[in-house]
C-alpha cells in the first residue's frame, strides 16, 4: 500500500484546470493517480466547490494549516520542560485553565513557558491511544452531555422539624464578603448505599470532605459536627443545606458547633450553587458508582488537600487554602 502524500501545487493547478473543463472528479482522480475521495475533500475544503475552487488559494490554506499543526506539536512535544509541568499538574487534577494561569505566576518573565488551555486540550485528545492518554484524560473533569434530573430517591412526605428557611438567612451571606458561611451536601455512592459528606465555604471555596458511616440523620450530624468543630471560631457562622432527611438532626449539629443551619427550597440547587459546582469537581476523584465504604479516610483527605491546593478561577487563580489562611490572619490581626 502506497504511503499517502499531500497534494502539491502542480496537482492543485491541474485540478483547477480540469474543473474548468467540466471534467468529473473520477476523471481528475484517474489522471492524477489519486483516490476520488482525496480530490473530493480537496475541492470542497474551506467552503469551496467545483465552481469556486482555485489552486493558489487552496495551496495557501494547506500551508497555513500545516504551520498550525507544526506549531501545536512544538508547544508540548518539543518543549520537554513545559510538557513535564503540564503532565505534573494534570495528575494533580488541575484543569488546563488552572495550569495556564499558574505558569504565568511561576514564570512571569519567561514567555516560552506559556500555553493556551485549548492547546492542552488539543494535545490530550490527539495523543495516540494508550496508557498515557487514558491516564491524562481521566484527570480531566468529566463533562456531561446533558443535565440529569437530580434525585435522592427519598420522597419528602413532611418538612424537617424546626428548620430555618434560606429566606431567614442573613443577607450578608449572598455577597460573599464575610467568610464563614458554608454549604453542605451528601454525594451518593454506588446504588445509593454509601455516601460522602461535603462542606464548601462560600467565600474561599475551601472544601471539607467528610466520611460518613451511613446516611442516618444522627450519624451525619455528628460526622459533620466533628469536622466543623476544628474550624476557627470566626469561620463558623452558618451552613445552608437542601431538604434531604439526612440533615433532620440539624439541631444536634447546631448544639455541638454553634453553627445555624438554613435550608434551601426544594428542587432549587442554584441556591447552593457553590456546593453543587464543587460536587462536580469531587467527582473527578470519586466517579459515579464509587462505593464509599471501600474508600479510606486517607484517600478522602488526600482528595480534599488536592482540591484546596489548586488555583480557582473564581478566586483570581489563587488557591482556596491560601485565601482561607489570608482571611484568618487578617481577622486575627484586626482583633489584636
Image (spheres, rainbow, N blue to C red):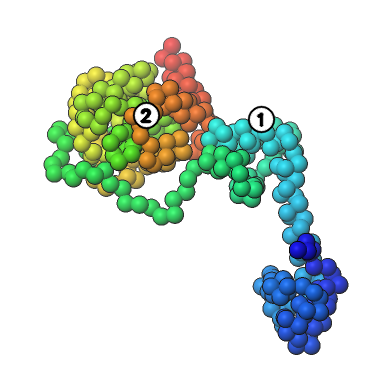
Residue 197 horizontal side relative to residue 155, left or right: right
Which part of the image, by quadrant, shows the N terminus? bottom right
> At numbered mark 2, what does the secondary structure look like: helix, strand or loop?
helix
Tell whether label 2 touches label 1 (CB within 8 Å): no
Which residue is rendered at x = 73% and y = 54% of the image? 69
Residue matched to label 1? 106
Location of residue 29 by image quarter: bottom right
Which residue is rendered at x = 25% and y = 32% of the image? 215
Location of residue 12 by image quarter: bottom right
Residue 195 location in percent, x, y? 31, 33
Residue 220 location in percent, x, y? 26, 27
Residue matched to label 2? 294
> At numbered mark 1, what does the secondary structure look like: helix, strand or loop?
helix
State the separation of the CA atoms marked 1 and 2.
Answer: 38 Å
Q: From this viewpoint, which residue is outermost toward the bottom?
A: 22
Residue 317 horizontal side relative to residue 60, left or right: left
Which residue is rendered at x = 76% and y = 41% of the image? 78
Closer to the camera in the image, 46 or 291: 291
Which residue is rendered at x = 20% and y = 23% of the image? 252
Amino acid at each position: 500500500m502506497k504511503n499517502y502524500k499531500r497534494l502539491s501545487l502542480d496537482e492543485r493547478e491541474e485540478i483547477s484546470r480540469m474543473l474548468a473543463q467540466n471534467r468529473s472528479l473520477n476523471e481528475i482522480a484517474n489522471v492524477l493517480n489519486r483516490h476520488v475521495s482525496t480530490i473530493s475533500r480537496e475541492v470542497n475544503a474551506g467552503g469551496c466547490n467545483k465552481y469556486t475552487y482555485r489552486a493558489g488559494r487552496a495551496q495557501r490554506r494547506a500551508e497555513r494549516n500545516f504551520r498550525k499543526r507544526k506549531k501545536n506539536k512544538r508547544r508540548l512535544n518539543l518543549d520537554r520542560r513545559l510538557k513535564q509541568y503540564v503532565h505534573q499538574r494534570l495528575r494533580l487534577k488541575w484543569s488546563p485553565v488552572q495550569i495556564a494561569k499558574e505558569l504565568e505566576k511561576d514564570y512571569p518573565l519567561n514567555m516560552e513557558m506559556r500555553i493556551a488551555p485549548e492547546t492542552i486540550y488539543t494535545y490530550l485528545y490527539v495523543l495516540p491511544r494508550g496508557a498515557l492518554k487514558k491516564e491524562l484524560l481521566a484527570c480531566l473533569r468529566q463533562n456531561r452531555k446533558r443535565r440529569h434530573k437530580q434525585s435522592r430517591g427519598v420522597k419528602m412526605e413532611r418538612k424537617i422539624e424546626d428548620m430555618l428557611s434560606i429566606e431567614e438567612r442573613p443577607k450578608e451571606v449572598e455577597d460573599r464578603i464575610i467568610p464563614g458561611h458554608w454549604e453542605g451536601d451528601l454525594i451518593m455512592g454506588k446504588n445509593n448505599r454509601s455516601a460522602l459528606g461535603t462542606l464548601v465555604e462560600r467565600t474561599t471555596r475551601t472544601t471539607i470532605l467528610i466520611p460518613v458511616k451511613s446516611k442516618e440523620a444522627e450519624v451525619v450530624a455528628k460526622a459533620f459536627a466533628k469536622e466543623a468543630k476544628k474550624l476557627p471560631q470566626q469561620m463558623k457562622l452558618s451552613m445552608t443545606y437542601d431538604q434531604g432527611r439526612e440533615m433532620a438532626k440539624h439541631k444536634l449539629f447546631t448544639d455541638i458547633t454553634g453553627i445555624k443551619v438554613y435550608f434551601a427550597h426544594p428542587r432549587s440547587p442554584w441556591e447552593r450553587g457553590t456546593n453543587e459546582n464543587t460536587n462536580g469537581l469531587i467527582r473527578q476523584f470519586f466517579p459515579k458508582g464509587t462505593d464509599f465504604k471501600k474508600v479510606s479516610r486517607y484517600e478522602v483527605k488526600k482528595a480534599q488537600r488536592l482540591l484546596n491546593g489548586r488555583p480557582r478561577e473564581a478566586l483570581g487563580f489563587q488557591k482556596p487554602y491560601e485565601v482561607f489562611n489570608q482571611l484568618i490572619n487578617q481577622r486575627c490581626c484586626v482583633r489584636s
